[in-house]
Image (cartoon, rainbow, N blue to C red):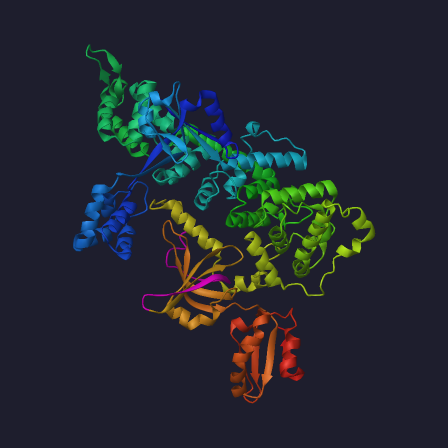
Amino acid sequence: MPDIDSDFCYEGRQRVIDYVVEKYGHDNVSQIITFGTMAARACIRDVGRAMNYTYAEVDRIAKQIPTVLGVTIDKALDLNPELKTIYDTEERVKELIDVSRRLEGLPRHSSTHAAGVVIASQPLVEYVPLQKNDESIVTQFDMTTLEELGLLKMDFLGLRTLTVMRDAVDMIKYNRGVDIDLDNLDFDDKEVYKMIGEGNTVGVFQLESAGMTSFMKELKPDCLEDIIAGISLYRPGPMAEIPRYISGKRDPKSVEYIVPELENILNVTYGVMVYQEQVMEIVRKLAGYSMGRSDLVRRAMSKKKHKVMEEERKNFIYGIEDENGNIEVPGCLRNGISAEAANKIFDSMMDFASYAFNKSHAAAYAVIGFQTAYLMRYYPVEFLAAMLNSVMGNSDKVSEYIRSAEKLGIQVLPPDINESYTKFTVKGDTIRFGMGAIKNVGVNVVENIAKSRDEKGKFTSLMDFCNKIDLSIVNKRSVESLIKAGTFDSLNVYRSQLLSVFEKIMDGVYSQRKKNIDGQMSLFGALQEESESNLEIRYPNIKEFNKKYMLAMEKEMTGLYMSGHPLDDYEKPLKEQTSITIEKIIEAQKNLNEQKNVELEDLVLDSSLTDGTRVIIGGILTNVSRKVTRNNTLMAFAKVEDLTGYLECVIFPKTLEKCNALVNEDSFVLIRGRVSLKEDEEPKILCEDIQPLELINSSKVYIKVEDREKANMIVKPLRVLLSQYKGDSPVYIFAAKEKASFRLNRDMWVDLDTDVIDFLISKFGEGNVKVVEG
């Protein structure tokens, strides 16, 4: 019985499963058990733990196992000479590896298959044993055994992209009045293929990764068949055939076939075996196999059953006769193909078949890829809004798609109490940030706000807002988060003022409602007519928070900077003083993870950035933490963020000792160091030096004192005095006697938007404080 996979919109997946249970009966449907086995790396770690090896010993050995799909310990010893050397020379390593070899591949634990469901015509207990896993009933046999028993297994998968497409089509209809029928697009649309070939693949299903994007730029697809082949080739194994495929596409006359009979089968892929269906067609057309027998060959090849395959080699070349001499399978020789050519063809199939992809699967994915590319090409605003909605819980992905929108000239507007809904929405050619992405603000809160606004009119003030909403749903924590995220900015009241009064206003409105319920007065009657002034808002006369603080609040509430970026003023110095953006380092890591150990020969993705490459990056430090090493010295870890992304920064003891004053939260720095790019790890920058990132043409503050001695005396108290005015403008002390200036450390720079200058004048005198424009 075949295994059937079906992808559904992830929001509707559970409805499908519920339908199947209802249709076929609760007793006839079950989820499936799956057994996790001890893979090479995990096996070494588990065995090392059981044998009381230290973490460092086990980690050193486990990291020597290449991260290649299906790698075994024996294969790792062949692939990695360093691992083989320590195995041969260190007794403890040999013991650990030998024990691990014996356990490798054995079941380690059981769990429930993520998507698999088995369906029978009778109660399943009549066919297989069942058990309870958590709250689910599952079969005790795994999916392979169920297939061999002839039971129907289906995978019901939730595919996020299908939800994105549905949402985009709905938004296009609502925003533009256009009905899009994705099933009847023009799949020969040259503009769509041109966009893909130019590498503009953001959000395009199966094509948006860095490596696949580079492949598409090389391939320059011009038909759906190219996309189908691309999806099938861009995987471990077939990747090695990518240059040959591209070469054949560019010059079809250069393609050669072992025998002419292969041309009609392989010409669509320029002589390269790409699909399982091609293997099946080869054995049918060249050797006379039946449909059923050709599928058995495909299965044996894909599962690397060598004994079965060697038997099939003979059948493929010489055919099969029954005991009466009747020909069941003619074989290649009877069909005029030499044994030498037949052997060569079979070898090619053997090399390829274990990695072969099912064409119908690839075609289905390619169609979705084209459909998403179509939406991106002609309706990028709605499509990106739908993409943003699909990743609302992931601030990194939200940030990535917002940057993509900005590159296309699409404005993503900040959340607004009078415009935003739960999800990202589209108005004209702009996207409005959804309030559902704000911390501490749930769906129920936003729905109540939107309902109140739609029924009672837009909010004109914080008081009006509190009067219209349901305070049993929208609590103080939610309102505080909304203010911090900037959703009330359009009311033209400072966030500092709103935060200082919102609790008092909410308490007042709540109290009046309680009195209204108690029958003491009508909140919207007597209160408004006679004593409305009792609840008038009296905002305190205070200044707005500085830009840096407001951005920090936005980051806290949304994971993003909404009204700007702390580095906006540093865009020019970042370009001039750095050698690379963080986005490029992240792309290099993605390429590494995708390529693994596969050599792409002529297909060069990005060889300019490798592990250990020296770079200069600039940005803002966040999440700073210091740790004591085993040598009792301090080292530090931090996140460094520029305008394109962020990565981890590792600051070793010697560098930290030298640059300690700069390693602080929200420091603007230039970092010189080496890039760390390791397979299946996050990219890092290993710091060698840290310098302050200075604004070009920034204003500087000078404080004049009598001499160097006096300058040294005031540094310590000045650090305390300036702590409340932190900013980006450098502060210098000028020693009059020596006529020398000394720049204070970065953590003592000030924000000139505050009253810092008045404060300094009060301390040092008007003639001793000066602001010099850069």
Q: Which residue appears farthest toward the bottom when viewing the image?
A: 737
For image coordinates 55% across by 35% down, the residue present is 165
Q: Is residue 329 above or below residue 232?
A: above
Residue segment shown in magenta: 606-631
Locate residue 680 relative to residue 577 in the image: left or right: left
Q: Position of residue 533 (x, y in %)?
A: 79, 56
Q: Quadrant of residue 737?
A: bottom right
Q: Considering depth in this image, is 17 or 673 the residue closer to the camera?
A: 17
Q: Considering depth in this image, is 602 or 562 the residue closer to the camera?
A: 562
Q: Is residue 547 above or below residue 82?
A: below
**What number of labels is visible?**
0
Q: Position of residue 267 (x, y in %)?
A: 40, 29
Q: Considering depth in this image, is 490 or 606 the residue closer to the camera?
A: 490
Q: Which residue appears farthest toward the top when viewing the image?
A: 324
In the image, is residue 252 part of the stretch drawn in magenta? no
Q: Position of residue 26 (x, y in %)?
A: 43, 24
In the image, is residue 627 part of the stretch drawn in magenta? yes
Q: Position of residue 304 (x, y in %)?
A: 27, 32
Q: Quadrant of residue 180?
A: top right
Q: Is residue 261 visible?
A: no
